[in-house]
Image (cartoon, rainbow, N blue to C red):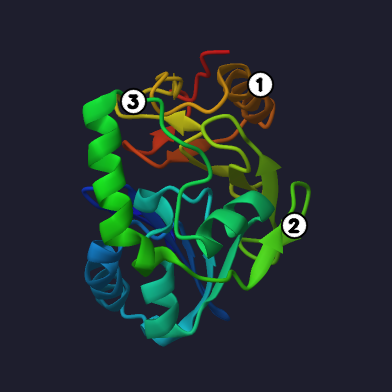
Amino acid sequence: MEIIPNVHRIPLITANVYLIIEEDGLTLIDSAMQSSVKKILSYIRSCNQDPTQLKYILLTHADIDHGGGAKALKVHTGAKVCASKIAAGALAEGKSSRELRVGRIGKLVFSFMHRVFSSSMIMDVDEVLSPGQTLPILGGIEVIDTQGHTPGHISFYAKETGLLFAGDSLITRTGKINLNISPAITWDREKTIASTRRQAELKPKAVCSGHGPVVFEPEVEFPY
């Protein structure tokens, strides 16, 4: 699905992945799970693009549904994987950057998933990103500190186009922007709220979240 010319949302079962097409190469924001890699590569080809032109994979955080496919995508394309310092540390160990607050059954499920998928996640990132840094993508994408859902969570804001790639710092499953503060998956509720306010101050023209459709103005209304 094309959001604006040359910027696509790849809607997958586990999470959204975003593709940016530029003359000097391609960029992905998040990578979904390893099981989605073939679909991502197929989507790139459907846009008449060569996956080997993928230059960057920018990760918002290290949860398996967002960073689980990065290692395999790098193998297939040679792309540079970029993440925050905390997310990079988690990926080096093949795990999320925080434990989920779930019950006994939930812990058993996630423990099983970790054993099954951790080996496919373990990797060293190529570049550690810092809040305030600007990347040479879409006329300049700024790295935004949006910790809360996880420690070290980052978003990417392209001022020239007004696109905010928010990962799981925001959620849009209802077609509107909602706080992502479910206790089971939230590392720090107050930091999540602060990150939501920080992103609202950017006044984006569209919010591209990790789960749910893209929300365009005038529907871009933040809960804080």
Could you tell which of marks 1 and 2 lies nearer the N-terminus?
2
Kindly identify which numbered label has been placed on residue 102. Answer: 3
Compared across the picture, whether 88 is left or right of 171 comes to right
What is the C-alpha distance between the residues marked 1 and 3?
A: 24 Å
Circle 1 residues within 10 Å: few <14, some 14–19, many ≥20: some
Residue type indicated by callout 1: Ala
Which residue is at a point 23% across and 72% down the rendered structure image?
Answer: 38
Count of numbered labels shown in the rendering: 3
Above or below, 151 relative to 217: below
Compared across the picture, whether 191 is left or right of 206 comes to right
Q: Are marks 2 and 3 in contact (CB under 8 Å)?
A: no
Kindly identify which numbered label has been placed on residue 134. Answer: 2
Residue 47: horizontal and vertical position, in percent?
31, 73
What is the C-alpha distance between the residues marked 1 and 2?
A: 21 Å
Whether residue 143 can be seen here: yes
Could you tell which of marks 1 and 3 lies nearer the N-terminus?
3
